[in-house]
Structures are given as structure tokens and as C-alpha cells.
Amino acid sequence: MRNLIIALVLLVLLPVGANASVSENVAPEGRKRVVVIDPGHGGPRPGKVMKDIAEEDYVLDVSKEVRRQLRTKMSNLDVYLTRSSDSAYHEKQAEDNKRRAEFANRKGADLYVSIHANAHEKTTVNGCEVWVLTLNERLMNQNQGQAARYADDGDFIDPKDIDRTSQGFMMAVARQLENEPFSRFFAQECCRNMSSYGLKNLGVKAGPVFTVLYYFEGPGVIVELGYLTNSDDYAYLSKKGSKTEMATAISDAIVSYFKALDGNVEEAPNEEPAAEEEETMEPESLTEGYTIQLLSSTVEVDKNDYQFKSYKGRVALYMGTGRYKYKYCYGSYATREAAAEELARVRETFKDAYVVRFKDGNIVTK
């Protein structure tokens, strides 16, 4: 019954989307639409790593391609990324997710799309899916085990920790009642588009209270591109052109979404738009933690040197002691365990790499 009501609400709202008095999700005349794309993970949390694919890198490439395509498809649209490099807003995942949502709120986003790749302990599980926020009592209590089994600690809010009598929760419920039909409409479009490239359509899902969606004030979704732990999905995601196809599926869904709301979109000129300066909020860097040392040197080496080609743009220089005081490292992690999980992949390129501790730009032993 609840889903039927939501569908009826959406049918009522979408055809009259040009009338701003109907819903806050309809743009006032003359105002550009705003989309915030969130490439999941980054910094100390690489996400799932399988063979040649690291989730943090893959979804960042897809997100940048979504932005590029949207700039050629809609002139009345501003597109922002929550991150444009291998970085995070905070060392704690829950706070990191919250800040991403707050960034989207400050930008006045009409739609918020967090992009991820999936994983499961059962390698037979495959397909694409899109998650929406729900504050339904029954679905909230399915928090554990409903989403990706490889989610980071802090990705979900335990329903038991939510004060159902608080003003904040009441406001969140009100926002969800308004936004869920719109989120579901976009999610359905996105699933349909992704499955057109051969992925199994697992559909729209709701259940866990995702922190990255809970603090956002408008329609928002989490897109799961496919399961890296499944051989078929991995084969597709690792093939040449898959990133562009996934970006096309998402960008086309965004265009369809705003066409449904506003009745039309302003097409961008045929020529490729000029590159724009990044407008993401500067993430909070770790000043202390663990990193993976690739090599050390007696003299300073260019971080873009050919020997670092596999990690171009992602190599950091730390200072140590002794003759080999220049330490060239990859990644920053809050715990030694997190760094160790990434070490095996790094050793495919730098066989002598190992985990070290850093503090304030220096390699330390304690």
C-alpha cells in the first residue's frame, strides 16, 4: 500500500513539474539545476579492491565522466563533485559521509548521486542496483545485512541509536516523505539505463539508514555499478569503455529526471565546454596515520617520475632520517590494518613496499 501511495504521489507531481508552487523539487524560473556527484570512498578508505580495480579510483573516473557528459547535455545545470582526487573529508567514515552530504546541501543540490561498486561474500551475486533512503520502521530494522557486506564502518546509522522523538528525526521523516518519490523515480531510470549495457537489474532498494543520504536535504541515491566479487560483473567493469557506459547511464538518467520535473532541459552547445576549476570542498587531510612506502632515496625525486607511473598524481613525499631520508609513499590510512589491506595490491608494482607510520609530514617509528 505504501509503495502504491508513493507511485500515485509521483504521478501527480511530475506532470506539473513546471509549477514551482507544487514542490520545492521544481526549480524556480531562471535558476540553474544543481547536481552533486559523490565518488564513494577515497583517502584512507579505498573501498573494495579486486585485481586491477580499486573502487575509489573506478568510481572517481566514472564521476568525472558523468560531469563531463552533463556539461555537454544540459546548459542549465551546475555539476559538482564531492572529491576530485584520492581524498576524504575526515578520517572517521561516519563524519566523512556527513560532510559529503553537507557539501551537497550548501551547493543547494536538486539531486545527490553517490557512486559505488558493490561486493558480496557470495561470488554468484551480481547486478546493478540503486539504494534510496527509507525511515520506515520495518525496513530500518533490516539495517544489518541488507546492503553491501563490504561497507565501511560508519556507513550506516543503527536505528537503535536514532531518537525517534527528536526534532532532527521528525525533520528527516518530513524530508523523506517529500523526497522519496523523486529519489525512486531517478533510481528506476538509472537501473534501467545501467542494465541496458548487460548488467542484471536488481532494482531499487531501501533498508539501511545510510549516513551519506540521511543528512542530505533533497532527493538522493546510492548507485551500485555492479559486484566486483562476481566474475561476470568484474569482466564487464574491467573492460575498455565500461566507465564511459556507466557514466552515460547515470548522466542520461539525470537528464530524464529533470525533463520529467521541468518539462524540458536546455541543451548545451555542441562543442566541448572549457575545463572548469574544481569547486569541491577541500577534504580534511590526515596529519597522522599510516602510509605505504614505495621507495626511499638519498636525493629528492620528482613525484611524477616515470617509475611512479602506476600512481601518478598520488605519490606523497615524507621525510625520514638517515642517508635515505626521502620517503615516497602512497595513500594515508587511519589504521595499520587498513594500510595492510591495500599493501598486497601495491606490491604488484613495488614488490618491496611496506607499511610505515607518519606524523606531520615525517616518517616516525613510534
Image: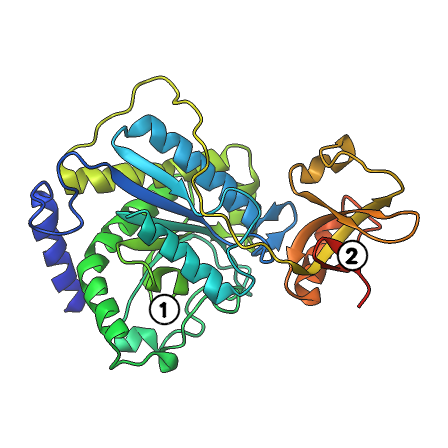
- At x 76%, y 31%, the residue is 306
**Local SS, label 2:** strand
Image quarter in which the N terminus is found: bottom left
The quarter holding residue 129 reads bottom left
User: Could you say where residue 254 lies in the image, as x and y percent from the top left?
Assistant: 29, 40
**Residue under the point 38% across and 31% down:** 69
Where is mark 1, residue-wise? Answer: 209
Q: Quadrant of the C terminus?
A: bottom right
Expressed as whole percent of the image width and height from the top left, the position of residue 5 reads 12, 63
Q: Relative to the observer, which residue lies in front, 81 or 52?
A: 81
Residue type pointed to by label 2: Ile
Rate crowding at label 1 as few (under 14), some (14 to 19) or many (20 or more) other CA atoms within 10 Å: many
Percent across and percent down for residue 41 are 52, 54
Whether residue 202 is visible to the viewer of this picture, yes or no, is no
Q: CA distance from mark 2 to mark 1?
A: 38 Å
Q: Which residue is mark 2?
A: 363
Q: Label 2: few (<14), some or many (≥20) within 10 Å?
A: many
Side of 257 relative to 352 (left or right): left
Hey, what amino acid is under mark 1? Answer: Val
Q: Are marks 2 and 1 in contact (CB under 8 Å)?
A: no
